[in-house]
Image (tube, grey):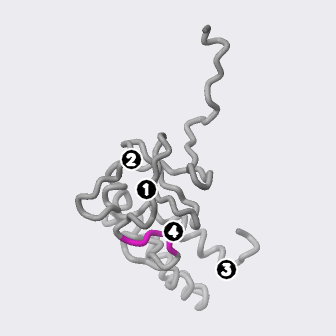
Amino acid sequence: MNKAFVREPDDNGQRQCPRCGSLGEAVGPGTVAAHLPGGAESGLADAAFFCPYATCEVAYFDLFERVLTTDRLSRAVWPKDPGAPICACFGFTRDEIEADVREGSVRRTRELVDRAKSPAAHCATASASGRSCVADVQRYYMKLRDPTQV
């Protein structure tokens, strides 16, 4: 058949979680390996994705719709577990952001943002998404300050 008559998929490089349909965030094999118990194999392809939807049981998935659920991870991760540190590099939790809001301060939050931009941050392996926590921290802070804006 002539390729002119075959329609290519319209995914634009976006990959969706096979369970909840959320847009996955691309992660490297090192990120996935860092969240598994020592020596455990993920069973996923190198091109894997993190499902950011908090209530979805899927942590990682690949293009073959193979999944790695949160119960297989070596520790709780944000946002899958609201009690987990929002910043895995430095152990910064929601409690600290909530304390800033209660006090009308941004001291702790600002200090974390500065630390997260430093060479001491190791987001690629500490964070389940492989990304910096700064956007999540700022979003959570703003949500608490003005819930109607988020």
The amino acid beneath tag 1 is Leu
Q: Which residue is mark 1?
A: 68
Of the image marks 3 and 2, the number of the one nearer the N terminus: 2
Question: Quick check: 138 left or right of 73?
Answer: right
Task: State how far apart marks 4 and 1 are (Cα).
Answer: 13 Å
Determine the secondary structure under disc 2.
Answer: loop
Determine the secondary structure under disc 4.
Answer: loop
Which of the 4 image quadrants contains residue 72? bottom left
> Could you say which is closer to the camera, residue 92 or residue 120?
92
Where's residue 91, x and y in %?
39, 77
**Labelled disc at residue 80:** 4
Magenta stretch, residue numbers: 75-81
Of the image marks 4 and 2, the number of the one nearer the N terminus: 2
The amino acid beneath tag 2 is Leu
**Labelled disc at residue 140:** none
Where's residue 47, x and y in %?
41, 42
Q: Which residue is mark 3?
A: 145
Of the image marks 1 and 3, the number of the one nearer the N terminus: 1
**Labelled disc at residue 44:** 2
Q: Looking at the image, is 29 positioned above or below residue 74? A: above
**What's the residue at 49%, 79% (across, down)?**
83
The reply to whether residue 6 is in sight is yes
Q: Looking at the image, is 108 positioned above or below residue 43? A: below
Contact between marks 1 and 2 (CB within 8 A): the answer is yes
Give the quarter of the figure containing the C terminus.
Answer: bottom right
**What's the residue at 48%, 69% (across, down)?**
78
The amino acid beneath tag 3 is Arg
Where's residue 59, x and y in %?
47, 59
Question: Quick check: 126 left or right of 85?
Answer: left
